[in-house]
Image: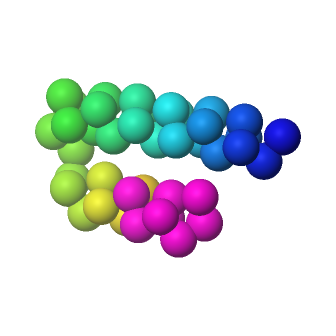
Amino acid sequence: MIKTKNTILLTIIRNWCNVQKLARINEKETKCSFCYFQKYG
């Protein structure tokens, strides 16, 4: 179950980051979400 949850989380974060990049939202937010995943994912 842990691997499945991590895979789903990774997919969500990747999609979220892609949406942010398309929307050109603050880069700091994208970096923070990426660091959050690396730290807790």
Give the x, y percent position of residue 1.
84, 40
Magenta-colored stretch includes residue 2: no
Total marks shown come to 0
Q: Residue, x 60% and y 66% (percent of image)?
A: 40
Evaluate whether residue 39 shows in this view.
yes
Residue 35 lies in the magenta-colored region: yes
Residue 15 sits above or below residue 6 on the image = above
Height in image: 27 above or below 2?
below
Image location (x, y in percent) of residue 12: 52, 34
> Could you tell me which residue is drawn at 71 percent across and 43 percent down?
3
In front: 23, or 35? 35
Please identify the dominant SS of the magenta region: helix
Decide if residue 29 is in sight here. Answer: no
Q: Quadrant of residue 28?
A: bottom left
Which quarter of the picture shows residue 23? Answer: top left
| Side of 15 relative to 20 (left or right) | right
Q: Position of residue 25 (x, y in %)?
A: 22, 44
Task: Name the residue at the right extreme.
Answer: 1
**Residue that appears at 41% across and 66% down:** 35
Query: What residue appears at the point 39 percent right and 57 percent down from the top-left corner?
Result: 34
Where the C terminus falls, by quadrant?
bottom right
- Left or right of 5, for residue 20: left
Q: Nearer the viewer, residue 18 or 23?
A: 18
Magenta stretch: give its range. Answer: 34-41
Name above or below for residue 22 compared with residue 5: above
